[in-house]
Amino acid sequence: MPGKLKAKIVAGRHLPVMDRASDLTDAFVEVKFGNTTFKTDVCPKSLNPQWNSEWFKFEVDDEDLQDEPLQITVLDHDTYSANDAIGKVYIDIDPLLYSEAASVISGWFPIYDTIHGIRGEINVIVKVELFNDLNRFRQSSCGVKFFCTTCIPQCYRATLVHGFVEELVVNEDPEYQWIDRIRTPRASNEARQRLISLMSGELQRKIGLKVLEMGGNAVVGYLQCFDLEGESGLVVRAIGTACTLDKLSSGSAPNTNTHMHPNTAPASNACNSPSKDGKEPVFVEDLPSSSGPPTPFRALPTSSSPPPFSPSKPCSRQSSSSDTDLSLTPKTEEPHSVRCRPGIFLCPSSPILSTDTLSLPGSGSVGCGRGSNPRATTSAPLSSIQSDSALLRKSVSFTEDLLLAASGMGSGGSAGKEAGPLRTLLRQQTQTALEQREFPFFTLTSFPPGFLLHVGGVVSARSVKLLDRIHNPDEPETRDAWWEEIRQEIKSHARALGCHAVVGYSESTSICEEVCILSASGTAAILNPRYMREGCLDIGCTDHRFEEPSPPNCGFCHIPYDELNMPFPAQLTYCYHCRRQKVPDVLFTTIDLPSEAAVAGKGCLIQARLCRLKKKAQGEANATAISNLLPFMEYELHTQLMNKLKLRSMNALFGLHIQISVGENMLLGLASATGVYLTALPAPGGIQIAGKTPGDLSSEHISSIQKRINDTIAVNKELYQINPPELAEEGVGSPIPEPRHRSRLFRSHSESSDELSELDLSHGKKDAFVLEIDDTDAVEDIHSLLIDAPPPTGFYSCNTENMPGISNWTSGVQMFTSVRVLRLSNANLTNQGLNKIFTDLCENLLKSFYFKLRSMIPCCLCHLNFTVAVPEEELIQVTVTAVAMTYDKEQTQEKTAEKPINKGSLEAEEQLQFPLELCADSSSSNIQTASKISGVGESTNMSPRVSSLERCSPLQEGRSRSLRSSRSFGGSSVTVVKMTPLSFLPGTRIIKYLGIINMFFIRETTSLREEGGVSGFLHSFIAEVFAMVRAHVAALGGNAVVSYSMKECVFMENPNKNQAQCLINVSGDAVICISETDQESSASTANTGQTGGSETDGAT
Amino acid sequence: MSVELDVFVGNTTIMDEEVYQLWLDGYTVNDAVKVRMEGGVMDECEASKDVLLSDTMDQYRTFQMCERLLHSPAKLANQLLFQIPPHRQIMLIERYYAFDDTFVREVLGKKLSKGTKKDLDDISAKTSVTLKSCRRQFDNFKRVFKVVEELKGPLVENIRQHFLLSDKLARDYAAIVFFANNRFETGKRKLQYLSFQDFAFCAGQLISNWTVGAVDNMVEDMDEHAFQTLPSLRGKTKVFIEMEGSFKNLSRGLINIAAKLTNTKDVRDFFIDLVEKFIEPCRSDRWSAADMKLYLTHYTNSAHILDTFKHQVVWDRYMGVVKSCIFKMYHD
């Protein structure tokens, strides 16, 4: 009986009138958990009842605690007829299950009814008493922390990054069960809400188990999604990055150089290696002395020799159990201070040894996955499929090399965790270890400096599937296999780019009827090569590259792949920064701009939008049609992105997200990214217009378009303040010897490659992009290229965490969600017409935002997240969530190096390093290896840390000061809860993560007109969702939600029946944040007007 | 092609004060867009008409959703649906309960009943305040009336606490409630020259001096006991009327008004009486405001000279109010 849940119902307020005669309500409350229900007394004739109930106690398994929500139902007592339900509150008690998060949930919750919306509020107190469970076969995973944030959370330090975790759970959708025909909409909605709540709980628990098996204690970058597959069921799936996090106690200065054994950290932080030994975190301190099973994942740096691995010794990868013992010795003076120059250990999945991992596009029955190498803009233009597959085929051999090479270093077995006594457990763990090795993926999008070494480019894969009923929900093999397939493809693409890892990884689906598009994308990257030397060597990278530390502000741009064996034709030049290594001409990534990157000017949101009509079809024919369209869409989107990037005179895209949404008669594609000028990359050439054949179109026409384009580029250069430092022509940076390819772009409908060579492109700028005008469509496309209005003065926009070129945020924050649905009444629309409509829709939305938020000028729209859907034939739905943040105009010219100040994350100051640790062979555990590790590691690891420390040292001081400050919040009647899709709030520091917020709501109405039509209905629903999120955060004791996102917003209407239904899923991290108090940050965030405790000054 | 659905929801509720005013003034969305366009908002952010329309619709919806809460402003502070900064809440409430003087002048002293509400379209036409706005104002009066009707304690303070209004607005509402409750006649042609503010001032005087326990107990009825003593004055003051006829008439007028105050029905005519019996004669004699002041001061004080006059306190109480009312009302 590992847990006791206690709930107390205090009072209600603003209840609706349930008795028309008296204008009053006789309310009582049912509290339900699992199968146990308690009731309060009836509080007669009051709209503000005071129940002040006893403590209702539930004795339950911790497994149930994780899965089940606490369900509170408010009812109106009726003597003669059935009691009427007023509404419900679901409380996720997960945050109470780990010691570092909230200890009590107490506050006012909106009473929610799926038909009537919010109807009054109820005051509830919930507590959990958790008993430690020593059972190693338990199915619960209490204590594993979850974060939506896609970077290492502030106030935590990652000691280990274990890698990718994924899980999915399926069930039948109650909405499609037979019983739904006879029950009320309310009952149906509630069944669905409850089921999804249960499923997310279960999913989280299962992922937690996997994390524990890997030896981690947290999931960062947790991304949970629903697939409403209709008849065929309901899928809840999640991915994340397993980590071992240590909490930075606010008392210790983070920049002291003492290195501590992590196990000596306070017990609350020490749930580092619990489940392996089947022990609860509290026992961790006993670990060193115990002769029990070792902690294999732990490689422990000492104060004098931080990096544990000798790069030259392959065997050192295999962390051995002896590490633990060894690391005990270098305990330093203060046993309880947190180690501050942390090493982050990474257990990357080493490649599996099978040789058939490459799934070529087009393989599979209906599935047509297509990996796109966006960086290969110069790659094969039209015949993308063939050329692409050819390309990939070429890379098969290439990858095989890698595989062979990898086999040396992978050498796995699944670590010493097999010390577990039971075979079943053993097998289970081996399996997960294998799986983990299979996918060296990271859902994180920003990393501590020095972690990300090289970025190869975006890798993505899509596959079209036909949904069928899930017959056995307990074994969702098909869905698992689908994703497995896609992930394999992603991995092979990454290998083709010479990369061993994928960062900024995400997965999504689009479902229409029985067709489902599965998509995955990420950024191929090389992480910390110092510890991957052999791998890199074998891949074919030149060794010298890694001899010297790559400069932090350009290193990640350097190509990871072999120049002579490039996976696609690309233009390479020597890095404009260090002049030593090759860089590509453009760089596309799905991650955030690394904080150390050198940029010129500001970034901006770049979107490519595309509509493609498709014939209505059923089943396999439909799926085939869609998979045939996909490559063309991807290609077009990339073309658009590239053109728009050039038009803005930028050379890199960050946070690239491509969404392809399927409808009955069309496909929508929307690619969003933040463009930026990386000074390490060559300056982008212009765009050149050329007629199909000279004199085909009037040359004046062409030249006028050309002039417009040139003007636009000039205007944009000024707008985004792109003034890259002029480079001297002499010196190391001599142009590369190989002949330059001229990059070319062609309209997809102008195929014949013969024409290409005939074009005379010699005039104009070097590197110019060529747009060929061969028909009116092309002209229109170019026009549409130019339509994109720049944001009005005072506004900037991006879709990433940090805005390139702006760092001095002030305190103004406004998160918003906007939904627009467009009905296409024109039956016979062309692709071109549709494109225009779709583009206008997105542009108008942006214009609306600028107008609405004009009072915040100067301001930047950050993390603009567009989601498109085709809910019905002829309907296009665009949902946007973003945050507007004010900044101080005076200081925008500041050097970009100071950006991390406002990013505010401890990770930057912490100078985390992620030494890679491979899963060690269980047998190869000896002390000697470990001692070598730490000895050699010292020398190899010094330089980057020093350099990065220098860069950020002033920051550290500031931060340490602010760490000491503490402030209590004043109590107004309603706590102000800020929400942001970013991982930070400007001008504040997060001092505590209270747990994940993951809520799912359904709202339905049968009186649509009375509620103000569809807009009125959705408007109040979104407002209600916000209110419920805020209430839950406030009840946890928090004052903000970071990394907030609206995962799902499914809207269905039937105006004729006066009905509408909407489903919304939101998630985020509930946090407590306090305002920055130290002088440094207050200087950088002038105008914040926020003051904190004055004792901080005295402390320094 | 048409926009089927278009919403924008901020975590902190976004409200434009200008649009709020247009909404309060009863403009339709399209009219509001027109007004905003003329106001030059479009230039601010390179906005188009569509953008303006979408923004106006959003805000109107927000206001409509807020309206329910504004009906009991105390709820606004502890509701959870909208996150509105406190200063904005104050603005929302203050503006929602603000009213047009021209409109309130029309309904002043009328019963706040359904019948009156039906006539609002006439008033709307007359005052050129939109019907929607008239209805809101009328409902506000009615709501405030209903709430304070059952409450004990000082009227102004009750209104301020229950509706979180500013002192000035609370006083105005107290005047409106007071007028409505006593059904003072204000609609006669002769009273047309008086503004709402004139009446509000007088009401303030009446409330604070003539209602029982003006400070600790709001009573709609006049202090009857006090006024019952006044008729006895009649005979006595007559003795001192030795001046010109006009003086005699004026004095008699004031005394008669005082005498009538005992009868609730006649109380309604208090203002018309003041005008007919006193202000109009004075005006026809072309008295200046200063003359008037001098006269009333001496007149009040002269009563004290009489030894036989036993009701000094009541007399002062009566004359103090009458005097200040007349000062306020004596203008063109």
Image: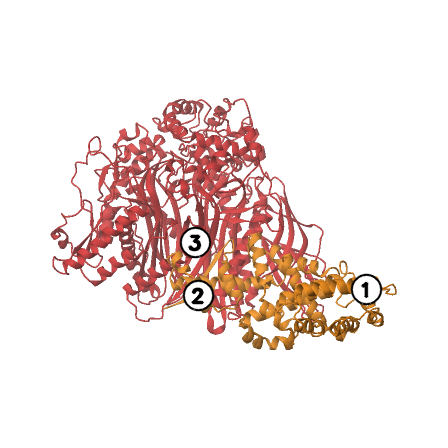
Chain colours: A red, B orange
Mark 3 vs mark 1: give the one in front: 1
CA distance for labels 3 and 2: 17 Å
**Residue A62 percent across, percent down from the top left:** 59, 46
Q: Pointer 1 indicates a residue of which chain?
A: B
User: In the image, what residue type sits under mark 1?
Assistant: Ala
**Residue B149 percent across, percent down from the top left:** 72, 66
Q: Which residue is mark 2?
A: B33
Quarter of the image holding residue A16? Answer: bottom right
Q: Which residue is mark 1?
A: B303
Q: Pointer 2 indicates a residue of which chain?
A: B
Q: Which comes sooner in the sequence, label 1 or label 2?
A: 2
Q: Which residue is mark 3?
A: A854
Quarter of the image holding residue A665? Answer: bottom left
Q: Pointer 3 indicates a residue of which chain?
A: A
Task: Check disc 2 and report its element: helix, strand or loop.
Answer: helix
- Residue drawn where x is 30% and y is 30% of the image: A546
Q: Quick check: A222 above or below B38?
A: above
Quarter of the image holding residue B294? Answer: bottom right
Instruction: Classify 10 Å Cα crowding around label 1: few (below 14), some (14-19), many (20 and above).
Output: many
Q: Quick check: A168 above or below B61?
A: above
User: In the image, what residue type sits under mark 3?
Assistant: Arg
Q: Is residue A467 visible?
A: no
Mark 1 vs mark 2: give the one in front: 1
- Residue B326 is left or right of residue A708, and the answer is right
Foreground residue among A122 and B219: B219
All told, the count of numbered labels is 3
Q: Is residue A451 visible?
A: yes
User: In the image, what residue type sits under mark 2?
Assistant: Val
